[in-house]
Image (cartoon, rainbow, N blue to C red):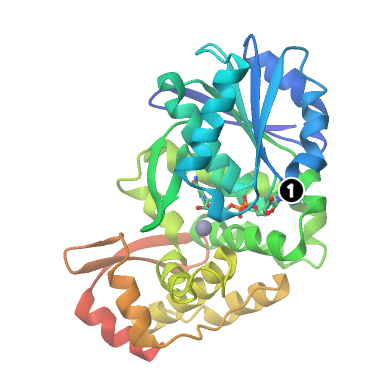
Amino acid sequence: MQTLSLTGANGVSDILIETGLLARAGAAILDTFSPSRVHIVTDSTVAPLYLEKLEGQLSLPVSHTVIPAGEEHKRLTTVETIYHDMLAAGMTRKDLVIALGGGVVGDITGFAAATFLRGVSLCQIPTTLLAQVDSSVGGKTGVDLAEGKNLVGAFYQPRLVLIDPAVLATLPNATFADGMAEVVKYGYIANKDILDMVSQPDYKAHIEDIIYECVKIKRDVVAIDEHDTGLRMILNFGHTIGHAAEKLGNYTDLTHGQAVAIGMVAAMRLSALLGNDDLTAPLVSILQHIGLPTELNYDREAIYTALLSDKKKFGGVVNFILVREPGRAEITPIEAEKLHKYILKL
Ligand SMILES: NC(=O)c1ccc[n+]([C@@H]2O[C@H](COP(=O)([O-])OP(=O)(O)OC[C@H]3O[C@@H](n4cnc5c(N)ncnc54)[C@H](O)[C@@H]3O)[C@@H](O)[C@H]2O)c1
Ligand SMILES: [Zn+2]
């Protein structure tokens, strides 16, 4: 078992990573918490796969909410359903909420835990690669509004995160590849050894070690900038143009991971246009090896407009995350006018 801990403003989060851990989750949970009852939130895809396995290990009253799978359910009405189910089950402030699922379940459940009775204990059991390397660690929780994604939320750290890479076996290949986009991102921003690991033909056999290295980076960044006021921005490598592409594709043409892959390639091209060494070719080859797209197929003018409406723009300046050598990222403010010229050349 590999363990990491994250010390935040409101205490410590323990992160345990081990293949097969879900089968021992009950013991790990009861080592950390002493609730009178537990409420599990999961979704309609994950429930038939893993819910019973988890419930069967908890020797105390357990209730659950199964939400329909999909980002379109990451909204306030779903949170309200969870509150009602928790009240009906008799949950009190001393009890425990568990999120069992991907990033959607994790974000909604985290928000419900942060707000129910002004805060109840939270355990994250992420079941997608994206949730294991990214969303389950760091305490960002929330839901979408009709106006945009993640517009309502709270910073709320889980006391415990249980990561079992074995559950990834049931993920569709495309969903696995989506999480790999974030893995490649971590390699470029903070640890080039990850890129070497991922370049191996049998990288999936080493996914536990890869996850550990990624979570360690996320832990380190969040420990310095828990509330996202500075350094945490480096986690947005590939996400600036990626978000613009996601938006132009109405959030349906590209998955998040595909958009991030395309966004990383575009950011690398931009870096070369700014006079840095051109690192685009090796990035493209890693992404192709994983099965992710690399070409930005949207009108550049539309990309620029979408970029400027993104929330990461402040006062005519866009903060770009650039990588000038693998394993090290820099936050580079670029004036909007100058950026326009470069985007047209991408
Ligand atoms: N809080 C954060 O810091 C943070 C960071 C990144 C992303 N996010 C959020 O995460 C969400 C995306 O997360 P995601 O990519 O995990 O999507 P998701 O939760 O929608 O999961 C993708 C699909 O995989 C299914 N699934 C989950 N685990 C499975 C398993 N083990 N086997 C088979 N199927 C499984 C789900 O039911 C779903 O259909 C977005 O809402 C995004 O905003 C949050
Ligand atoms: Zn992302």
Q: Nearer the viewer, residue 48 or 258?
A: 48
Number of numbered labels in the structure image: 1
Q: Position of residue 233 (x, y in %)?
A: 37, 54
Up-down relation of residue 300 to residue 121 (above or below): below
Up-down relation of residue 72 to residue 304 (above or below): above
Q: Position of residue 280 (x, y in %)?
A: 53, 80
Up-down relation of residue 159 to residue 301 (above or below): above
Give the quadrant of residue 275: bottom left
Who's the residue at 65% across and 50% down the image? 69
Up-down relation of residue 218 to residue 120 (above or below): below
What residue type is disc 1 on? Answer: Thr
Which quadrant is the C terminus positioned in? bottom left
Q: Position of residue 147 (x, y in %)?
A: 36, 58
Who's the residue at 64% across and 45% down the image? 132
Find out if the beta carbon at label 1 lies less than 8 Å from the nearest ligand 1 atom. Answer: yes
Q: Position of residue 182 (x, y in %)?
A: 57, 58
Q: Residue furthest bottom?
A: 345
Helix, strand or loop at mark 1:
loop
**Residue bearing mark 1:** 45
Q: Is residue 312 left or right of residue 116?
A: left
